[in-house]
Image (tube, rainbow, N blue to C red):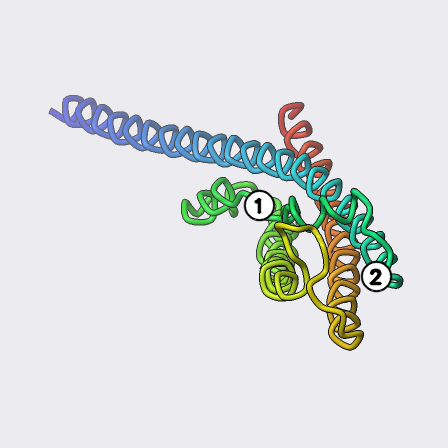
Amino acid sequence: MKRLLFKFGGEAVLIVVSVFVAILLESMWQDHREAQDARESLAQVRLSLMEDREFFDRVEIEQRKTADNLHKLIEWFGEPETLPNDLVQGFFVNYEMPISIWPRRAAWETMVSAGQLQLLRAPELTTRIGDYYEHHLRRIEYNGRQYDDAFVSVWEGDMPQIWDLKEGRLIITDPARLVHFRNRVVQLEEWTQFYIDSVHRNRAVLDELIEDIGLFLGRDNDD
């Protein structure tokens, strides 16, 4: 009887231990799977940042072209009695508002909402990424909205009051009003230069993040 009880007791303990080990292994596998999912999500964030990087280049090209055209327009308004050249004519008739930054956030917001940040066990890196999205990009988005509003105000508010789009000529001769419009264009040129500098600063932060995320993912793959 004692031997039977000892046997059954040993088997019961073995079953309990086996169940415990199975649960532990399942938990470890689940943790590994969740950590792997978090790393894959981080890779998507990096891909999104790389796409933003290409967009930053496009924005800067358009903004620099606009700044150059605005400068030439300001020069012409120094002598508005001269006939407007083709550039001035084209700028008034076919102006296009240069694009501003509207970054992609979906991959980052998905990571945050899924609670994956702590799974990476890289608090310094995730803090920097969060600071980039929640501080740097929000600021440049805010500046972009202001810039767009200023551009629209000048070209859809002020310009039709001094320029005949159909005839391609000035419709006013009042020096004060011409100086007022020229000053508005000067302000817009300064805004454009400020925005270009802002894009350049944010791109430098973006380049560093892309590189550091790549190093983190590469190191993790080596491990």
Q: Left or right: where does residue 3 sit relative to residue 138? A: left
The front one of 204 and 90 is 90
Residue 103 has which mark?
1
> SS of the residue at dot 2?
loop
Q: In this view, does 19 lie to the left or right of 60?
A: left
Q: Nearer the viewer, mark 2 or mark 1?
A: 2
x, y percentage for residue 73? Answer: 81, 55
Q: Viewer-proximal residue, 50 or 84? A: 84
Quarter of the rendering containing residue 120: top right
Question: Which residue is depicted at the point 46% across and 32% down?
Answer: 37
Residues at marks 2 and 1, CA–CA distance in whole angstroms: 40 Å
Measured from the top left, where is residue 34 in percent x and y? 44, 35
Residue identified by numbered label 2: 80
Q: Position of residue 195 (x, y in %)?
A: 73, 56
Mark drawn on residue 43: none
**Type of the residue with mark 1:** Pro
For residue 85, side relative to residue 111 (left or right): right
Q: Earlier in the sequence, mark 2 or mark 1?
A: 2
Q: Farthest residue to the bottom: give it.
A: 176
Instruction: Name the residue rendered at 80%, 74% in the picture.
Output: 175
> What residue lies at 73% left-to-right and 45% top-to-bottom?
203
- In the rendered structure, which amino acid carries the disc numbered 2? Pro
Quadrant assignment for the C terminus = top right
Dot 1: within a 10 Å radius of its alpha carbon, few (fewer than 14), some, or many (20 or more) residues?
some
Q: Do the residues labelled 2 and 1 touch (CB within 8 Å)?
A: no
Q: Is residue 25 above or below residue 167?
A: above
Position of residue 151 relative to residue 97, above or below, is below
Front one among 60 and 140: 60
Q: Which of 30 and 52 is in front in this view?
A: 52
In the picture as drawn, the residue positioned furthest to the left comes out as 1
Up-down relation of residue 139 to residue 93 (above or below) = below
**Residue 176, how many percent across, how many down?**
78, 77
